[in-house]
Amino acid sequence: MHDVTEPGQRADIPFQPTPGAPTWDVRAVTAIMAKLSPPPAHDMADGWHAVPWDQGVAVQRIMAGHHLRPNRAGRARDAWDALIRADREHLRAHDLEIMNPGTSQTYVRVPLPAEPQTRVFVRRTGPIEDFLRAVSFEGWEGIGGMMRLTSTHASAAYRIADHEGTEVWMGDNSAHRCIEALANHYGLPMPIEIVADR
């Protein structure tokens, strides 16, 4: 059920979820792109960079310190365009859907597995009027969080904090999206299955 290998790590070193870890889809795209060329040494190094995007993952190119396609026609722009084409061919060959082909980035969506990849346990804690729930993840001891339903003037919204007390998300009235935000915060694979006590 677990995504056991962090891209860039040896297969015998398991992935460990941590606060602020790259999301599962960013890790998947990173692993795919690493088959095309090695990951860059740091965030501003020339090469490709897989970063979160609101609908998936953006593969950003950087060349000679620039992250935008050269304006002028010539060798630099031809080289840039060749890199972007190679990225897209490689991503399509690995069954990733190109969502928005920009001139400097390639936006992709990683298909969700059909079966849940992370099981989440949610249980009531404290007095019922506190609307407080403890959240834990099967197989990952020591991480999780606390979710609270808080009232607003017009309605209510869920808030969730990680195991260190750092607020991860304050959103609408969807407990599922709130718990997904916590799982993403730790880099756990999607989709999630929620097992709640009653």
Image (cartoon, rainbow, N blue to C red):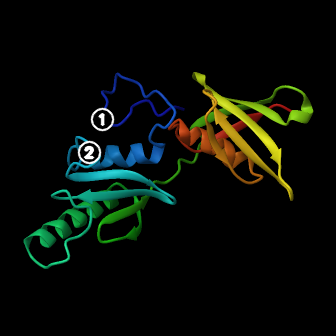
Within 10 angstroms of label 1, few (less than 14), some, or many (20 or more) residues? few
- Residue 111 percent location from the top left of the image: 49, 54
Residue placed furthest toward the left: 75
- Residue 172 percent location from the top left of the image: 74, 54
**Quarter in which the N terminus is drawn:** top right
Residue contact between numbered discs 2 and 1, judged by CB atoms under 8 Å = yes
* Apparent side of residue 5 relative to residue 166 in the rendered image (left or right): left
**Looking at the image, can residue 137 be seen?**
no
Mark 2 lies on a secondary structure that is: helix
- Type of amino acid at the residue the image marks with label 2: Ala
Identify the residue position indicated by label 2 in the image: 34
Question: How many numbered discs, if any?
Answer: 2
Mark 1 lies on a secondary structure that is: loop
- Determine whether 143 is above or below 176 in the image: above
Residue placed furthest toward the bottom: 73
Between 195 and 47, which is closer to the camera in this rendering?
A: 47
Identify the residue position indicated by label 1 in the image: 8
| Residue at x-position 47% and y-position 57% | 56
**Looking at the image, can residue 30 be seen?**
yes
- Residue 102 percent location from the top left of the image: 34, 71
| Residue at x-position 55% and y-position 43% | 190
- Type of amino acid at the residue the image marks with label 1: Gly
